[in-house]
Image (cartoon, grey):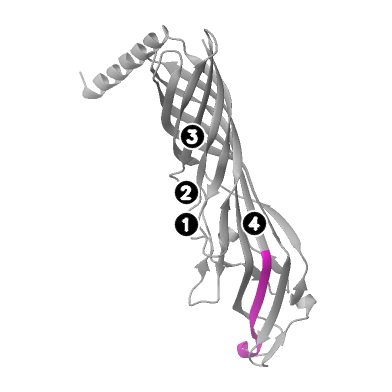
């Protein structure tokens, strides 16, 4: 017999054995809620990153191989949130304009300067997680339990919202040795507080996780699980194109703020990205589940 056929047959027999063994046990379905720090985790070269709280609703199924251990899966609807605060950000970069139609490049080149005050950006993502795990428990009915496994996360929605308390822009023309600070029709001046919102395009995640706690038997077929858990993504969920200026100047005099994850400081020898590490899912908190034995 071909070696691969032997492997397939062995896998089939193992599956039949597990299912037939589990049929004599009280398999469980459960519904629960989890909450704590649930964030899109990353590092920044400017300002301060702040993880935020989130929550998760979950539905699970545990296939008991013996009275003390089993394998399980389910679905989770999980909210992840994060925030970055930058009290003050100043930058500048050269622009080749067409302010003088017949002028030379030297005459039309200016240094675009800007300063943000009180900048804040919040990111929020809703993921559908599918966990696969092993679960152990110390007693047949009540006692300590522990489970570990991996989650595949599928992004459902993701947004970012930013705001600032003040924005100041100007243009310095070296050829004229003049700095223009009050030409609103050209994008130079003082701007009041403003807000902006846009969508985020995130990728699927892979997150190992672990949970430990206490199982309480409430009756013959009813149980309550209370515990603590943690997860950390091993897969990057965002493709950063972070070479853009934090504030983009266009030839028509309009200015557009770029998201933090896509922006870089421009006034050094080379652009320095504000986002300085990959974006991953991370959560730690407490969980409560109500389970029914079948």
Q: Earlier in the sequence, mark 4 or mark 2?
A: 4
Q: Residues within 10 Å of mark 4 (few under 14, many from 20)?
A: many
Q: Do the CB atoms of the residues marked 4 and 3 lie less than 8 Å apart?
A: no
Q: Which of marks 3 and 1 is nearer the N terminus?
A: 3
Looking at the image, is 91 positioned above or below residue 46?
Answer: below
What residue sits right under mark 2 in the picture?
236
Q: Do the CB atoms of the residues marked 1 and 4 lie less than 8 Å apart?
A: no
Name the outermost residue toward the bottom.
Answer: 176
Instruction: Report how far apart the C-alphas of labels 4 and 2 lie in the structure.
Output: 20 Å
In front: mark 3 or mark 1?
3
Q: Do the CB atoms of the residues marked 3 and 1 lie less than 8 Å apart?
A: no
- In front: 57, or 152? 57
Instruction: Report how far apart the C-alphas of labels 1 and 4 lie in the structure.
Output: 17 Å
Dot 1 falls on a residue whose secondary structure is: loop
**First to last magenta residue range:** 105-118
Q: How crowded is mark 2: few (under 14 residues within 10 Å), some or many (20 or more)?
A: some
Q: Earlier in the sequence, mark 2 or mark 1?
A: 2
| Residue drawn at x 47%, y 39% as measured from the top left | 231
Quadrant occupied by the N terminus? top left
| Residue 94 percent across, percent down from the top left | 60, 80
Looking at the image, is 151 positioned above or below residue 94?
Answer: above
Looking at the image, is 166 positioned above or below residue 285?
Answer: below
Instruction: Report how far apart the C-alphas of labels 4 and 3 lie in the structure.
Output: 28 Å
| Disc on res. 277 | 1
| Residue 125 percent across, percent down from the top left | 60, 44
| Residue 26 percent across, percent down from the top left | 46, 10
| Disc on res. 121 | 4
| Disc on res. 229 | 3
Q: Earlier in the sequence, mark 1 or mark 4?
A: 4
């Amino acid at each position: 017999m071909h070696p691969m056929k032997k492997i397939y047959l062995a896998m089939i027999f193992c599956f039949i054995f597990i299912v037939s063994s589990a049929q004599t046990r009280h398999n469980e379905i459960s519904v629960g809620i989890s909450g704590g720090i649930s964030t899109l985790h990353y590092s920044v070269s400017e300002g301060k990153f702040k993880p935020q709280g989130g929550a998760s609703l979950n539905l699970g199924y545990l296939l008991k191989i013996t009275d003390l251990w089993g394998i399980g899966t389910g679905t989770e609807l999980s909210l992840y949130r994060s925030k970055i605060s930058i009290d003050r950000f100043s930058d500048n970069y050269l622009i080749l304009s067409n302010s003088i139609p017949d002028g030379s490049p030297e005459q039309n080149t200016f240094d675009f300067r800007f300063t943000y005050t009180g900048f804040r950006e919040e990111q929020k993502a809703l993921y559908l997680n599918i966990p696969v795990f092993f679960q152990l428990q110390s007693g047949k009915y009540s006692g300590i339990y522990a489970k570990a496994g991996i989650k595949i996360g599928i992004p459902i929605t993701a947004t970012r919202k930013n705001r600032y308390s003040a924005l100041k822009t100007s243009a310095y023309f070296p050829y004229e040795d003049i700095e223009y600070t009050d030409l609103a029709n050209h994008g130079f001046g003082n701007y009041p507080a403003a807000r902006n919102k846009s969508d985020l395009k995130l990728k699927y995640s892979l997150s190992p996780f672990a949970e430990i706690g206490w199982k309480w038997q409430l009756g013959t077929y009813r149980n309550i699980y209370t515990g603590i858990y943690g997860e950390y993504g091993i897969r990057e969920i965002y493709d950063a194109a972070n070479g853009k200026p934090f504030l983009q100047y266009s030839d028509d005099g309009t200015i557009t703020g770029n998201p933090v994850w896509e922006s870089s400081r421009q006034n050094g020898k080379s652009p320095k990205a504000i986002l300085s590490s990959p974006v991953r899912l991370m959560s730690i908190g407490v969980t409560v589940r109500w389970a029914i034995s079948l």
